[in-house]
Image (spheres, rainbow, N blue to C red):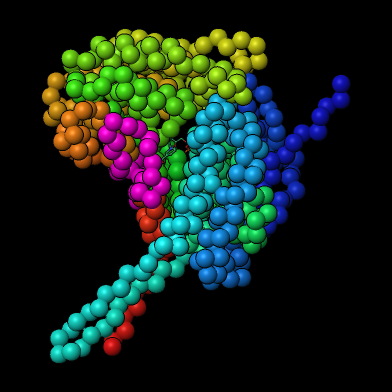
Amino acid sequence: MTAQPQEWIRNFVDGAFVDPDPNRAFAAVDPATGATFAQVHEADRGLVDRAVAAARAALAAGWAERPVRERADLLRRAADRIEERFDEFVAAEIADTGKPITQARELDIARAPANFRTFADVVSAAGQESFLTEMGGGRRALNYAVRKPLGVVAVIVPWNLPLLLLTWKVAPALACGNAVVVKPSEDTPSTATLLAEVLAEVGFPRGVYNVVHGFGAGSAGAFLTEDPHIDGVTFTGSSATGSHVMKTVAPRVRPVSFELGGKNAAVVFDDVCLDEAIDGLSRSIFTNTGQVCLCTERVYVQRAVFGDIVAGLVERAGRLRLGRPTDTATTTGPLISQKHRQKVQAYLELAEAEGAEVHTGGGIPAMGADLDGGSWIEPTLWTGLTNRDRVLREEIFGPVAALIPFDTEAEAIALANDTDYGLAAAVWTNDLRRGHRVAQAMNVGMSWVNTWFLRDLRSPFGGVGLSGIGREGGESSLHFYTEPTNVCVQL
Ligand code: NAD
C-alpha cells in the first residue's frame, strides 16, 4: 500500500495561501475516531508579522474608505457563497469537531451566512450621534461623531462553535472597515481556512482577511497578541486565557472584547410546564456535548417538582444518541479532544468524591469499532452537591449538570448568582411577572425565560465577572469595532 500524500491546512496571508513548512506542522485530529486527517502549518512569528503587515497594507490601500454599501454588498456575497459551498463547510466542521451533521447544518454553518447578512444590515442602517449644543445668547454648536474602524483587529476564537464564533466577529469587523488577522483554535483550523477561499472568491481585497494557525503560548496566539501593530483584540475562549491576553496587550492599552467562560444556572419554578421545561433544560445541558459557553451546568429546582425534573432529565439523557457524526440519527458527538476529555473525566471523579449521587452517566461509553479511539463521554446528571463544591464553582464544559432543590424565589436568585461567572441564565416559570423579575435579577449578560440560546443577532451578547468584558451583537459590535471622533462646529 502506498502512503497517501498528507493534506495540508495552510495559513492565508495577503490574499494567498502560504506554502507549508513540514518542520512546523501539527496534526488535525478527528475527535470522533482519534485519527489524523491533515497536517496544519503552524505559523511562526515572522508569518504572523507578515499577516499583520498585510492587514495594515490593506487599510492603507483604501479598504476603510470604501463606501459602507460596497462593504455590505461584499458581506452579502460572502453569505451567498457560504451557502453555495454549504456542504464543504459542514464536512470541514464535522472533521474538526465530530459534531453531529444535523447540528452542524442547522446551527453552526447556518449561522455563518446569518452573521454576514445581519452585520451587512446593521452597518447599513447605522446612523451617527449628533447634538445641537445651545450656549445661550443665540450661540450654538453642532456636535457629531464620526465612527472610524479600529484598524487591524486580532480575532482569536475557540473550538466549540468554530465558524459560528469566528464569523460573529469577522463579519462586523469587516463591515466597519477593519482588516483582520484570525487565529482559529489549534483543534479546529478547517472552516476559518475555507472561509479565506470564500472571501477571496467574492472579491474581498487582499490582506483584509488573514488566517494564522497555531497554539496560544509560544505560538501564533501569543505572537499575534504581542504584535505591536495590532489595534484591538476580540477574543472568545476561557477566562484564564482572556486574562492572560489582557495582560499582554495592557502595555499598549489596546481595546479588547472578551467573551469568556460560564457556569450558567437554570432556575425552575414549580408552576412550570414540566415537559417543556425538561425539553429546554435537556437542550441547554447537552447541546454540542455541553460545549457551548451558554450551556447550563447548575440547575436549581423548586422542591415540589425536583423529583419530576430529575426523572425527566434522566429520561431525556437516555434518548441521546452518541454516534457517528455523519449519521443523521446522531444527537451527540464526542468531546473536542482527549485532553479535554481528561479534564471532564477528572470532574466526573471529583463529583463523586464531593458526594454526588450519579443519576445517569458518569463514565466513558463503549462506542465500538474505530469510534473507541475518539474522545467520547457519557452525558451525566448529579444530585447531592451544593454551591460550595468545586463541581458547582468551576466551568467543566461537558454534557454534565448538577441539580439542587430550593424553596423560595429569593433563595433561587441567591443560589444562581453565587458564582464568579456571569454569562447566561434561564428561568422556567409560567408566572409572567416572576419570569421578568427573576430574569432581571440574574447577574449575567443574557437571561432567558422559558427558552435557552434563542438569539437575535441584533441584541447584545457578552458576560460580566469572569465571563467577559464588553458586548458584541448589533450596534454593540459597531461600537467595539469602531472609534468615534467627536467633531464640534460652532455655528
Ligand atoms: P482557550 O482559552 O484555551 O483558547 C481559545 C483561543 O485562544 C484558542 O484559539 C487558543 O489557541 C488561543 N490561546 C490560548 N492561549 C493563548 C495565549 N496565551 N495567547 C493568545 N491566544 C491564546 O479556550 P478553548 O478551550 O479553546 O475554548 C473553551 C472556552 O471558551 C470555554 O471556557 C468557553 O466557555 C469559552 N467560550 C466562551 C464563549 C462566549 O461567547 N462567552 C463562547 C464559546 C466558548
Q: Residue at x 28, y 16 (%)?
A: 309
Position of residue 248 measured from the top left corner of the image (x, y, whole percent)? 45, 51
Q: Residue at x 58, y 71 (%)?
A: 62
Image: 208 above or below 284:
below
Outermost residue toward the right?
1
Position of residue 475 measured from the top left corner of the image (x, y, whole percent)? 37, 57
Question: How many numbered tags mark residues here?
Answer: 0
Which residue is at the front of the view, 110 or 292?
Answer: 110
- In the rendered image, residue 15 lying in the magenta stretch gets the answer no
Image: 67 above or below 432:
below
Quarter of the figure with the N terminus = top right
Query: In this rendering, would 251 be left or right of 102?
Result: left
Query: In this rendering, would 27 be left or right of 386?
Result: right
Q: Residue at x 70, y 36 (%)?
A: 39
Image: 102 above or below 78:
above
Position of residue 406 measured from the top left corner of the image (x, y, whole percent)? 18, 20
Image: 376 above or below 164:
above
Quarter of the figure with the C terminus = bottom left
Boundaries of the magenta span? 445-470
- Residue 130 shows in the view: yes
Query: In this rendering, would 199 be left or right of 230?
Result: right
- Residue 59 shows in the view: no
Q: Residue at x 22, y 27 (%)?
A: 429
- In the rendered image, residue 457 lying in the magenta stretch gets the answer yes
Position of residue 163 measured from the top left corner of the image (x, y, whole percent)? 54, 41
What secondary structure predominates along the stretch shown in magenta? loop
